[in-house]
Image (cartoon, rainbow, N blue to C red):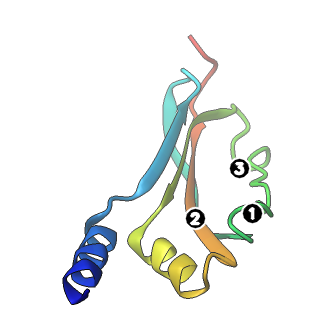
Amino acid sequence: MTRRISLLVMVLVVTGCYRITVNTGAPASATQIDKPWAMSFVFGLVPPPEIDAKATCPQGVATVVTERSFLNGLVGALSSSLVTPMHATVTCASGPRR
């Protein structure tokens, strides 16, 4: 029994981050919006608040990356997924899409 528990713990520890990248095709600029603890709740059924990029990115958005880091996953595991944070990064565009 302890062997199965040890194996389960090892599988949970070595799992990677969950990551999604959306690329709009616009050239990227150096300006980014970084939200390392965007909080969602109840297994992600209540989504995190929207990121309003209009003021920061007047040319539009080049890429959006959302991921769950190890610490985000740890918080989710410790709260039995009642709190499920994620890390969101928005990279602004430097001009229109080509």
Instruction: Kindly report which numbered mark, 3 or 1, lies closer to the viewer in this rendering.
Output: 1
Residue 43 in picture, x, y percent from top left: 68, 66
Is residue 36 at least partly visible in the picture? Answer: no
- The residue labelled by disc 1 is 48
Q: What amino acid does circle 2 point to?
A: Met
Choose top left, top right, bottom left or bottom right for residue 50: bottom right
Q: Is residue 11 above or below residue 78?
A: above
Q: Is residue 5 above or below residue 86?
A: below
Residue 70 in picture, x, y percent from top left: 39, 71
Q: What amino acid does circle 3 point to?
A: Thr
Q: Quadrant of the N terminus?
A: bottom left
- The residue labelled by disc 3 is 56
Q: Say how many tags the image has.
A: 3
Depth order, front residue of 32/71: 71
Residue 76 in picture, x, y percent from top left: 56, 77
Q: What amino acid does circle 1 point to?
A: Pro
The answer to whether mark 1 and mark 2 are in CB contact below 8 A is: yes
Depth order, front residue of 10/31: 10
- The residue labelled by disc 2 is 86
Instruction: Identify the element where label 2 is drawn.
Output: strand
Which residue is most to the left?
3
Neighbourhood count class around disc 2 (C-alpha, 10 Å): few under 14, some 14–19, many 20 upward: many
Q: Residue at x 50, y 25 (%)?
A: 27
Instruction: Identify the element where label 3 is drawn.
Output: loop
Neighbourhood count class around disc 1 (C-alpha, 10 Å): few under 14, some 14–19, many 20 upward: some
Q: Viewed as shown, does residue 33 lie left or right of 9? A: right
Mark 3 or mark 2: name the one nearer the start of the chain: 3
Mark 3 or mark 1: name the one nearer the start of the chain: 1
